[in-house]
Amino acid sequence: MQAFEYVAAQTVPEAVAVLKEKGQQARVLAGGTDLIVQVREAKRDVDWMVDIKAIPEVNVLTHDSQNGLRLGAAVPCYQIYGTESICESFPALVDATKIIGGTAIQGRACVGGNLCNASPAADCIPPLIVLNAICVIAGPGGEKELPVGAFCTGPGQTALERGEMLVALKIPQPSSHSSSYYLRFIPRNEMDIAVVGAGAAVTLDAAQETIVSARIALAAVAPTPLFAEEASALLAGREISDAAIDEAAAAAQAIARPISDMRGTAEQRTHLVGVLTRRALKGAIQRVLDA
Amino acid sequence: MARKTHVQTQINGDSVEFLCEARQSLLEVLRDELQLTGAKEGCNNGNCGACSVILDGRLVNSCLVLGVETGGKVVETVEGLAAPDRLHPIQDAFLENAALQCGICTPGFLMSAKALLDNNPNPTEPEVRYWLAGNLCRCTGYDKIVRAVLDAAAAM
């Protein structure tokens, strides 16, 4: 691996100062499960690794029904699926964190890192989009917030500017009769990268017969994970039915613009968007009914 | 010559100090600096699990941890698994079940299994299989390994 300097920042301003001074030559190190591989394989040139795991703000994990979830950028996957109240309120995020890599990866990899790595196939990003997550970003000019849907700008590219770092994600508490679901297609049971991923969040009426609102997001079918806005909107006010779900799946397929690569063809991916959107919606609805 | 950092950590119950460059992984530090060659380098990118060790109670791929990150932390490797006079029950179960052939993956499987049983003393077979999904074995076909871990759980 190329030589680089290592800084274990103790505070957000300390990390921001290094990131600002070193610019593109510096990179934030959290779980390292993507970054260390990229540097070792010479896919990313890094002269400074800024370890943020000693900073208290990036390790915060708080959840209550008033303020929702605050998830520090470096909280590893296992802590998310190991927290019962998160499993109850944000199951799509739990679905994703349980299938990223294997046990050893989940011990280090974090949702914030999955987001900042900005892979089109990132499993955590569709759940964050459907759950309306807000990115809390610190930079030389202070703190700012950005909806997660605007965070990824291309493969491996984010809206973070020089000197900025992701500190935490804020996810509002879903209203009652709500749930969410994420799944992906891979050719095996585990330890793989999504051919296509789909997340859905739904809110039903009190009678649990009508969809009040829905949000659908897709992974691995465009340069960034996508919010399927039209597919989501057309479900609002609709009675739960296969016809409504099929319409949403078709609308989701219409915005997919996948490539063909070693994981699958564009045609297969477009087909999978329909299948997985239906399953994600039905999965989220079933979770409300089962609650 | 790149700058070396002094790191103090605890490995298998012993206080250990070492010097390493920032670019050296924990796996490289264990094998090249500390002569703890139990953890193996397989893929060196987090897919095979041959380098699995336990860091502060969590299973990690030591190829994906920097040595400089381990200051003040507790590391468990396969060298610390057996007691001075007897094997660990997981090691006994691997022998009894012939859960290894070439042996390259075995230290990783043993540490992964230990982390599982520390966390969940009575796992089901699917739980064992999913937990061990990050450890690859090209000899056994996995079944003997899964049986060994279930036997170890029953024996412990």
Image: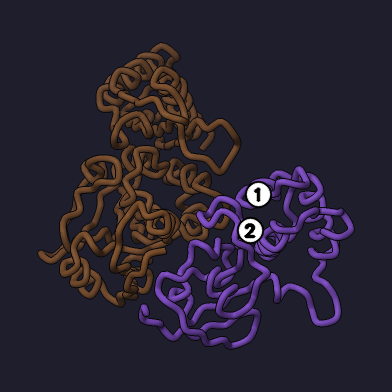
Chain colours: A brown, B purple
Kindly give the residue lying farthest to the left in the view shown.
A141
Direction from residue A285 to residue B104 in the image, left or right:
right
Residue A19 position, x and y percent, is 21, 66
Tag count:
2
- Please state which amino acid type lies under the numbered disc 2: Ala
For the point 47% across and 53% down, the residue is A85
- Please state which amino acid type lies under the numbered disc 1: Leu
Q: Secondary structure at mark 1?
A: loop
Kindly give the residue lying farthest to the right in the view shown.
B96
Direction from residue B126 to residue A63 in the image, left or right:
left
Q: Chain of mark 1?
A: B
Q: Chain of mark 2?
A: B
Direction from residue A16 to residue A40 in the image, left or right:
right
Kindly give the residue lying farthest to the front in the view shown.
B1
Answer few, some or many: residues within 10 Å of disc 2's Cα (few below 14, many 20 plus, some between 14 and 19): many
For the point 43% across and 27% down, the residue is A281
Residue B82 position, x and y percent, is 78, 74
Direction from residue A127 to residue A14 in the image, left or right:
left
Q: Is residue A60 visible?
A: no
Please tell me the numbered disc located at residue B50: 2
Q: Secondary structure at mark 2?
A: loop
Residue A253 position, x and y percent, is 35, 19
Closer to us: B149 or B38: B38
Q: Cα distance, mark 1 to mark 2?
A: 8 Å
For the point 24% across and 60% down, the residue is A165
Q: Are marks 1 and 2 in contact (CB under 8 Å)?
A: yes
For the point 79% across and 63% down, the residue is B90
Closer to us: A174 or A98: A98
Find residue A195 and report its image quarter. Answer: top left
Residue A238 position, x and y percent, is 33, 18
Please tell me the numbered disc located at residue B136: 1
